[in-house]
Image: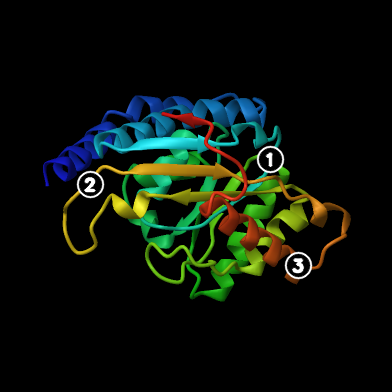
Amino acid sequence: MIRTIYIGGYSLSSLFFSLSELNRVRNLPPLMSPAKRDKEVHDKPKKWGRKVIELTGSKVEVNKKERLLDGPVLFVSNYQGPYDIPALLGYIQKPFGFFSKQKFENYPLWNQWMNSMHCVLIDRNDSTRMKEAYRTGIHLLTQGHSLLVFAERKEKGSKDLHHLNGEDLSMAVEAGVPIVPVSIDGTKEIDEQGTFRIRPSTLSVHIGSPIREHLDDTITKTQLIKKVEEALQGGLLKEDGEKEDQL
């Protein structure tokens, strides 16, 4: 319970005291390169993510960091719970925006940070908005910004294969960027569903081998979905490399 209060208090206070930093990143020179701009914008969110995980008492193991590429990519991750985002923001060295629920549009300051980070707010129950979100995602990728999407979970904390939305992957096909699978494990252990208890955990963030076959049309949509699903599952089962760093 005490950890929960600390995390909530830290998140609210850091958001409030980020006003000057938010104004700074919103006024970065328009001709700045996407890579440099994203690094500037994500400095604060990265620190926030690391601090949140630190306050849970957890440790993070990052595997295969050398697989992170220069240039824009579509990260595809499995989903275990609300601590996935701070963990991925804090410990993946490459900046990225992410697809998130439409409700965050109504969260003051938080929504402005998400906009600066090039996050895309979605409502999967609204086909018109989803088409618009995909167009936005393709545009951001072609402009040099990386994005992250989550595979749809079967159930909370499941290690079974997660269902991938083919339209999510189509953004990488249309934009001509590699897909990088990211398997995250351990965040489900941090929060006990239905309670306010926070428990320390050891988190694993596994960077999968970049997938490029779709860039030269040597793979079908169905094959691409299967390849990404298998990569995510392999990372969860630690069948694709060994631990590199513990942070």
Mark earlier in primary sequence (3, 2): 2
- Residue 30 versus residue 203: which sits nearer the camera? 203
Q: Position of residue 210 (x, y in %)?
A: 71, 45
* Residue on which disc 2 sits: 199
**Residue at disc 2, secondary structure:** loop
Which residue occupies 58% across, 60% down?
133
Q: Disc 2, disc 1: CB below 8 Å?
A: no
Regarding residue 105, the answer to whether it shows in the image is yes
Q: Position of residue 156 (x, y in %)?
A: 37, 65
**Quadrant occupied by the C terminus:** top left
Q: Position of residue 119 (x, y in %)?
A: 51, 48
- Residue 211 versus residue 120: which sits nearer the camera? 211
Dot 1 amino acid type? Pro
Which residue occupies 35% across, 48% down?
83
* Residue on which disc 1 sits: 72
Regarding residue 27, the answer to whether it shows in the image is no
